[in-house]
Image (cartoon, coloured by chain):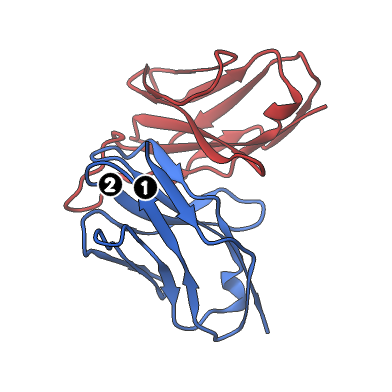
Amino acid sequence: KAGVTQTPRYLIKTRGQQVTLSCSPISGHRSVSWYQQTPGQGLQFLFEYFSETQRNKGNFPGRFSGRQFSNSRSEMNVSTLELGDSALYLCASSLTGVLIIDSGANVLTFGAGSRLTVL
Amino acid sequence: GNSVTQMEGPVTLSEEAFLTINCTYTATGYPSLFWYVQYPGEGLQLLLKATKADDKGSNKGFEATYRKETTSFHLEKGSVQVSDSAVYFCALSATGTASKLTFGTGTRLQVTL
């Protein structure tokens, strides 16, 4: 069973450009979440998509956006890049995004990440 | 809001030593608790979880018990190996939510021979 696949793995952009990152969830998973990991702020939740709709959103500016397609694949976009956007962007998927308390099923599975460097 | 506090690293241990990484949390309701591990150059892997008070999560020799009275979820392993060297993250999710995790800052573990 293939895991969560993120592309590209590494990319370099300059300030002011925009970037699009892609995430293919585990087959059958309909919830996709995005996280930003930086040395200074740690791991922070960006947003979650379920059935092509944004269901949850973290505290990031509007330059950060995303979408989900009918096959559950997701993309996130960062416009007008700033130096502080340099980070590892992690995608995670789960069946529905709702934790089943009794069994603990439906936890997140993370991809290897896309490392963005902004110069 | 929700928050997770982990002990500062790095933690350096000799192989076969006992490991404890402290984690405490602040949350409303009944959160679920997780430990994730990140090896160099990789994403996060779920190590163990606990979804109710007094639950003990365990995996690969690691254990953690959900203590609601002390709002803690400390990670322990009786005998660490060099291959356990990684960064460990404690995390919580609000009741019923799997997708929105609140993470601690991470604790780097270095195990030497």
Which image quarter holds the C terminus of chain B?
bottom right
**Residue B92: which disc?**
1
Mark 2 and mark 1 lie on one chain; the one further toward the N terminus is 2
| Left-right relation of B73 to A89 | left
For mark 1, does the 10 Å Cα neighbourhood hold few (<14), some (14 to 19), or many (20 or more) residues?
many
Residue under label 2, please give it.
B31
Across and down, in percent, residue A29 comes to 35, 35
| Left-right relation of A3 to A90 | left
Which image quarter holds the N terminus of chain B?
top left
Figure check: B10 above or below A83 = below
Alpha-carbon span between mark 2 and mark 1? 6 Å
Indicate the secondary structure of the residue bearing disc 1. Answer: strand
Q: What color does chain A have in the rendering? A: red
Across and down, in percent, residue B51 comes to 25, 53
Q: Chain of mark 2?
A: B
Residue A2 in view: no
Indicate the secondary structure of the residue bearing disc 2. Answer: loop
Q: Which chain is blue?
A: B
Taking depth in this image into account, of B81 and A61 the one nearest to the observer is: A61
Figure check: A41 above or below A20 = below
Q: Chain of mark 1?
A: B
Residues at discs 2 and 1 in contact (Cβ within 8 Å)? yes
Residue at (40%, 66%) from the top-left corner?
A: B74
Across and down, in percent, residue B97 comes to 29, 37
Taking depth in this image into account, of A74 and B105 the one nearest to the observer is: B105
- Count numbered badges in the picture: 2
